[in-house]
Amino acid sequence: MPFHFQQFDIHQDHAAMKVGTDSDLLGALCAGGRHILDIGTGTGVLALMLAQRCPEAEITAIEIDENAVSDARQNFALSQWSQRLHLQHISLQDYLAVHRQPMFDSVVCNPPYFDRSLECPNPGRTRARHTSSLPFPTLIGGAYTLLKEDGFFSVCIPPEVLSDFLGICRATGFALSHDYAIKTVPEKGAKRHVLVLKKGMVEQSKEETCCMRNSDRTRSDWYQELMKDFLICGAL
């Protein structure tokens, strides 16, 4: 069964990784632009959210997994923005072998981040979840190469890798523009960080703690406002 958003559907019969909260948060909070690259698009949900958010954007989506490409191709073709969505079955490493110049105003990625845990037996899930398929230095360096000056790089990562990830970003030349620390409920620590980094100077970075649910487990006003143009009311 497809996952229904307000303005598009996500068919996910073949992709190893299904629509989840991480992609919803990143799609709503990431930086936009006129020319956008979605690295590891999976089912294409981030690219579709950006197409909805940025009416003039041309979006290139790259994906290494053939099964995910099959779903993304269908989702793009059925959307109202199909002419602005450009899908390529290619890894970032191979894409960089051809494109070595700044091309994009914004790069977005929901990256693999497990590097010390056992890899799962499903090769598709391993590629999607583990840094062996896309190490942080390769991802960050690739994003920096492909971004225009003053362009933005947006990711969603867990707190366990935050320090290492930011260290590589800063060493590469990125400056932190915004860190959204996302809690599930107020009494717990952050479960994810949505980072927006800039290729260029930032006068002052912003840090914001956000909760998806209230203490009584109802959806927070912040989350409902963030997702009001995407999720169908019953899915909030």
Image: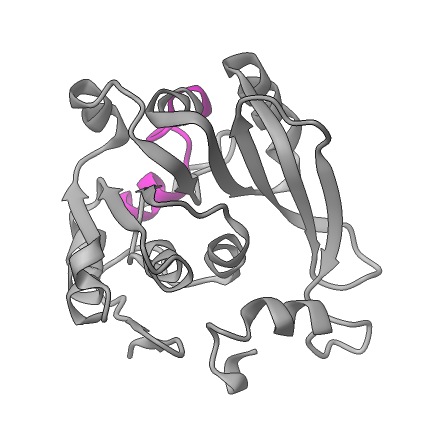
Question: Relative to residue 67, is residue 213 drawn left or right?
Answer: right
Residue 136, position as x, y percentages in the image: 45, 25
The span shown in magenta is 122-139
Question: Is residue 77 among what the camera can see?
Answer: yes
Task: Identify the residue at horizontal 73%, vertical 30% (top origin).
Answer: 204
Indicate yes or no whether the magenta region holds residue 11: no
Q: Which residue is found at the position 41% from the left and 36% from the top?
A: 130
Q: In the shown orientation, is residue 65 left or right of residue 157?
A: left
Residue 81 or residue 192, whichever sits in front: 81
- Residue 118, compared with residue 11, is above or below; it is above
Closer to us: 18 or 59? 59
Q: Nearer the viewer, residue 51 or 64?
A: 51
Q: Determine if residue 220 is in view.
A: no
Q: Is residue 138 magenta?
A: yes
Q: Position of residue 158 (x, y in %)?
A: 60, 42
Which quadrant holds residue 205?
A: top right
Q: Residue at x 29, y 29 (%)?
A: 103
